Image (cartoon, helix red, strand yellow):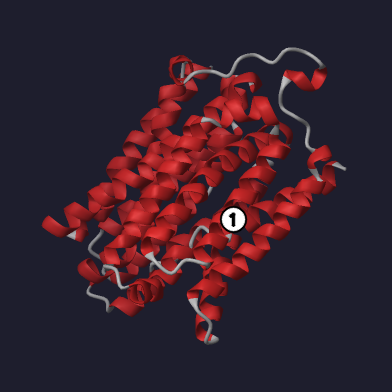
Amino acid sequence: MASFLLAIIYISFVSLGLPDALLGAAWPTMQTDLAVPVSYAGGLSLIIAIGTVISSLQADRLAKWLGTGKIMVISVAMTALAIYGFSASSAYWQLCLWAIPYGLGAGSVDAALNNYVALHYASRHMSWLHCMWGLGASIGPYIMGAALTGGLSWNMGYGIIAVLQVILTAVLFFTIPLWKKQTLEANGETAPAPLTLKQIVGIPGAKEVMVAFFCYCALEQTAILWGSSYLVRHNGLDEETAASLASLFLIGLTIGRGLNGFLTYKLSDANLIRLGQGIIALGVGIMLLPLGAAASFAGLMLCGLGCAPVYPCIIHSTPEHFGEENSQALIGVQMASAYVGICVMPPVFGLLARYITASLLPWYLGGILVVMIAMCERLNRICK
């Protein structure tokens, strides 16, 4: 049964990744059909992100009340409903309304599922599962692209993903008995009250891991969002070529997470995080060298490769650092910190690129990396 449940979790990670890159893939067509400015995609992303932060902060309370299995079913059902809402929308304000359940469904399931894997499975599975998420995130735009090139509308592309999410919801519903409810109530005892945000932040090491997660996701998303612009502004590439080569970061990230699963047999989570940070530093350093476009390509791919172990290993080490009884609460605030980093730091670099130069990208990534390393090492000292 444990192996069957693990297979379900792998499928879930692929399916959960499906909608994550849809908006970017579909927006050029959506923007034209809806007759709104291109910048309005940022409004939808912000609504989704705010909903994700809110639901991530409630993950501990929901886990103690419902258990992981029920959270999975409810959250994926909310996401399926929201994606169906996108497929049925014909105006921007309708998309804004459906973006609310879209975000609320994403945060709690992400925190609950990551915590379940951290508690019950080896570190290699955490890396491979996030590799599967990357696979799903890559398949989603492919489905949307196939729908558009096949003469269908973007609404139909969202509709196809909604159907897949409904199927996943049904599968998860029938697997609820397989999930071991992560509360003391499962043993007939009284569950402790959920921790408040003030209590969570007061746990030694909590502030450090929140800042580390903020920095990691800020670095990852800034590289993804602005890598193409950097290649155009700094290396003089045409936009089409730069867009293709900027995907080297994501290629490095996906390959790295596949390899990282095997490295967990030899290295601890802490050392894998250090290894990843060292590779990121190497990538940033190569981007700073005056070696032309080739150095920029290599640097971006190395940055992606280095990012690979950081996210899954921080998550997997949470029960060890803070105790199993606190892991769900800590993972919830980590997810919230991640989305705050995603909301804040890429736009800040956008201002730097607009008013100074996009060539500052490696310096910006390097600065974030220094703070992340400092927080991770401080966390290790505190938790020892």
177 relative to 71 in the view: left or right: right
* The residue positioned farthest toward the left in the image shown: 355
Residue 127 seen in the current view = no
Whole-percent x, y for residue 145 in the image: 51, 77
Residue drawn at x 77%, y 47% as measured from the top left? 173
Q: Nearer the viewer, residue 109 or 170?
A: 170
Instruction: Note whether 32 is above or below 270 in the view shown.
Output: below
Residue furthest out toward the right? 1
Q: Work out whether residue 314 can be spotted.
A: yes
Residue 293 position within the rendered picture, expressed as x and y whole percent measured from the top left: 29, 70
**As drawn, 273 above or below 346:** above
* Residue at left offset 50%, top offset 56%: 253
* Vertical placement of residue 210 versus 266, above or below: above
Please state if 299 lies on the left or on the right of 147 as rendered: left
Q: Residues within 10 Å of mark 1 (few under 14, many from 20)?
A: many
Task: Name the quarter where the N terminus is drawn.
Answer: top right
Q: Looking at the image, which residue is at 25% across and 59% down?
A: 289
Q: Which residue is mark 1?
A: 81
Front-lying residue, 336 or 51: 51
